[in-house]
Image (cartoon, rainbow, N blue to C red):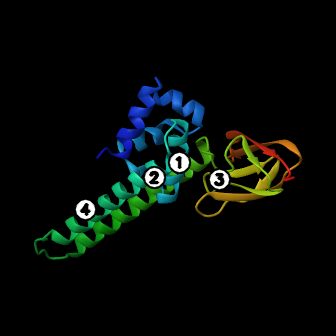
Amino acid sequence: MKKVGEILEEARVKRGLTIKDSSKFTRIHEQYLKALEDGNYALFSDSVHIRGFLQNYSKFLGLQSQEVLAVWRREYKDTEEVVQNQGKSKVFAKFVLTPQIMVTIFIVIISTFFSWYVYSQYRSYAGVPPLLIESPEDNLVTSSKEIWIKGMSYKNAFVYVNGQEAKTTETGSFRFPVSLEDGLNTFVIKASNRLGKETEVKVNVLYRETE
């Protein structure tokens, strides 16, 4: 069975697109698209972000996002089970936990945490924030007067819907209620960081009142 990365790469190549092309149209940074195709999920902060990126990228490539997510869930679950089984089957040699070893372990932990913190802060402040719109889909036709605009970005990003701020949660997700006018409604969603770098996505929704 093909892995998610292979499915995505084949679909992209079939359409004659490069990673750079796909990044331009999806507004998803190249490193995340490459990570999805390589199956390098360690680059993402959690599974919620992976699902959001996969859903948007697969839709862009003309794939059935739910089918791609189903393959990913099996693949992700298998990976976790392999890691757990490997951890249970390992037999560690006995050693003496000396003060020197404890100090070394402590330094490594502190250094790792500090490096991760610096990187996460740099990514949030300096990088262009990603912006994934989960719903509504572009060019949606609906008879509902009230809808929610839902999506995802960095947790420290400033998100606006037609100039009105949409608060992000600790995971970077956001949801914003809007009222529709008769006919075509255009929503401009922007995500920006403290350095002014921003990503913009436009979504069109056609409201038709039920007769």
Vertical placement of 86 versus 139: above or below? Answer: below
For badge 4, the amino acid type reads Val
Q: Which mark is residue 69?
A: 2
State how far apart marks 2 and 4 are (Cα): 20 Å
| Residue at the far left in the pictured view | 93
Q: Is residue 172 visible?
A: yes
The answer to whether the residue labelled 2 contacts the one labelled 1, judged by CB atoms less than 8 Å apart, is yes
Q: Please state the horizontal and vertical placement of residue 119, each as a whole percent of the image.
A: 49, 50
Q: Which mark is residue 82?
A: 4
Residue at horizontal 59 percent and vertical 50 percent from the top: 124
Q: Earlier in the sequence, mark 3 or mark 1?
A: 1
Q: Which residue is at the front of the view, 202 or 139? A: 139
State how far apart marks 4 and 3 are (Cα): 32 Å
Q: Earlier in the sequence, mark 2 or mark 4?
A: 2
For badge 1, the amino acid type reads Gln
**Residue under label 3:** 151
State how far apart marks 2 and 3 are (Cα): 17 Å
Tag nearer the camera, 2 or 4: 2
Vertical placement of 11 versus 131: above or below? Answer: above
State how far apart marks 2 and 1 are (Cα): 7 Å
Count neighbours of disc 3 (C-alpha within 10 A) and say few if under 14, some if 14 to 19, many if 20 or more. Answer: many
Q: Please state the horizontal and vertical placement of residue 205, each as a whole percent of the image.
A: 77, 44
Q: Which residue is at the front of the view, 55 or 192? A: 55
Q: Earlier in the sequence, mark 2 or mark 1?
A: 1
**Residue under label 1:** 55
Q: Please state the horizontal and vertical placement of residue 136, each as a whole percent of the image.
A: 69, 50
Residue at horizontal 89 percent and vertical 46 percent from the top: 182
For badge 2, the amino acid type reads Leu
Q: Please state the horizontal and vertical placement of residue 123, each as a whole percent of the image.
A: 55, 47
Judged from the image, the secondary structure of the residue bearing numbered disc 1 is helix
Residue at horizontal 51 percent and vertical 35 percent from the top: 61
